């Protein structure tokens, strides 16, 4: 059984979201519904499942609904309609106590801007999730130090986040999510605020960690390169809908529609250029400078 199952999920923002369904059934577009009723359809009938131990990337342009979709998984955002199941537990419809249990023990979240407390030390930041869970101090410390070792920051435990670079702060954010040892990590544009080289380092670190920890990761990005690099499978979102789900190879070689084809065209072009670079011979370059023959 898949680790996460999302079935026919909708999230509609506005005062009377259920009034939107008949309009959707009539075939009105998202824009028409927004204009007529003031409701935004952020997630529109999304279905997918995430297998245990895979990195499942949700990729799409800004505003396509990625963040809303992923936040519905632990009900940080309340879905309007649809079903979400984590392991055997139905998240949608769970009472508050059950929901708290799922959030605390199964799911860790990593945000784009780290969301660290500036006046707590690195270690105290990592301990936060365990503190909320009421884990005793000694155990808290032990688990947090272990998480800091996992991200290579054990020597920075007593510093404040402000003393650390952006990449290091993001590693603290990751350690905080790892400290509670969740099976699932939800990562919302976690590396998007980082400089390209540091971002690349973080991607590599996460892939190395994943090879050891085998978490189930839902990874949001608006960057196709990052999606192709990180994803075992990728879901591409457009206007709240998932327009294709597949492995990076499938997305590149068999785009399901023009929208995805446009997305991948530049990447494919680059691949061809790189291949030509490798094959190019010095005499060919001389001829090229002479102009067409
Ligand atoms: P992404 O993560 O792909 O950038 P979001 O999930 O943040 O997209 O947003 C999807 C759509 O939902 C956007 O049109 C956005 O303006 C809208 N939206 C997000 N949150 C809210 C909210 N709290 N209230 C109203 N509309 C929202």
Image (cartoon, grey):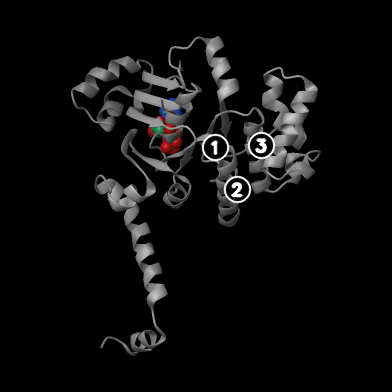
Residue ID for mark 3:
175
In the image, residue 149 sits, relative to residue 141, either above or below, namely below
In the image, residue 188 sits, relative to residue 247, either above or below, namely above
Q: At numbered mark 2, what does the secondary structure look like: helix, strand or loop?
A: helix
**Dot 1 and dot 3 residues touching (CB under 8 Å):** no
The C terminus lies in quadrant: bottom left
Cα–Cα span, label 1 and label 3: 15 Å
Within-10-Å neighbours for mark 1: few <14, some 14–19, many 20+ = some
Cα–Cα span, label 3 and label 2: 12 Å
In the image, residue 160 sits, relative to residue 289, either above or below, namely above
Cα–Cα span, label 1 and label 2: 13 Å
Residue ID for mark 1:
214
Q: Front-most of 267 and 107? A: 107
Write down which quadrant ligand 1 falls in.
top left
Residue at point 34% right, 53% down?
Answer: 264
Residue ID for mark 2:
205
The percent coordinates of residue 198 (x first, y second) are 61, 53
Choose mark 1 or mark 3, whichever is in front. Answer: 1
| Mark 1 lies within 8 Å of ligand 1 (Cβ measured) | no
Mark 1 vs 2, N-terminal side: 2
Q: Quadrant of residue 44?
A: top left
Residue at point 40% right, 41% down?
Answer: 233
Q: Front-most of 91 and 161? A: 91
Mark 3 vs 2, N-terminal side: 3
The percent coordinates of residue 84 (x first, y second) are 41, 21
Mark 1 vs 3, N-terminal side: 3
| Mark 2 lies within 8 Å of ligand 1 (Cβ measured) | no
Q: At numbered mark 1, what does the secondary structure look like: helix, strand or loop?
A: loop
The percent coordinates of residue 25 (x first, y second) are 21, 22
Residue at point 28% right, 32% down?
Answer: 31
């Amino acid at each position: 059984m898949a680790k996460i199952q999302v079935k026919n999920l909708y999230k509609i923002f506005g005062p009377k979201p259920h009034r939107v369904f008949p309009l959707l059934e009539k075939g009105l577009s998202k824009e028409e519904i927004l204009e007529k009723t003031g409701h935004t359809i952020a997630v529109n009938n999304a279905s997918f499942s995430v297998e245990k131990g895979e990195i499942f990337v949700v990729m799409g342009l800004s505003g396509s609904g990625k963040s809303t979709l992923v936040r519905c998984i632990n009900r940080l955002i309340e879905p309007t309609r649809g079903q979400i199941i984590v392991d055997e537990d139905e998240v949608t419809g769970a009472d508050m106590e059950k929901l708290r249990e799922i959030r605390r023990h199964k799911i860790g979240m990593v945000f784009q801007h780290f969301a660290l407390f500036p006046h707590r030390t690195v270690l105290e930041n990592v301990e936060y999730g365990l503190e909320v869970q009421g884990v005793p101090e000694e155990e808290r410390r032990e688990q947090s130090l272990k998480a800091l070792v996992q991200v290579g920051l054990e020597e920075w435990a007593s510093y404040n986040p402000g003393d650390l670079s952006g990449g290091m702060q993001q590693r603290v954010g990751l350690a905080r999510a790892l400290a509670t040892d969740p099976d699932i990590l939800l990562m919302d544009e976690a590396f998007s605020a980082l400089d390209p080289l540091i971002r690349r380092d973080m991607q590599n670190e996460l892939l190395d960690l994943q090879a050891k920890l085998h978490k189930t990761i839902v990874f949001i990005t608006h960057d196709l390169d990052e999606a192709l690099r990180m994803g075992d499978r990728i879901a591409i979102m457009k206007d709240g809908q998932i327009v294709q789900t597949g492995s990076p190879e499938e997305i590149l070689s068999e785009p399901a529609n023009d929208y995805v084809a446009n997305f991948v065209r530049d990447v494919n072009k680059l691949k061809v250029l790189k291949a030509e670079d490798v094959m190019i011979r010095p005499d060919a370059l001389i001829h090229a400078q002479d102009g067409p023959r």
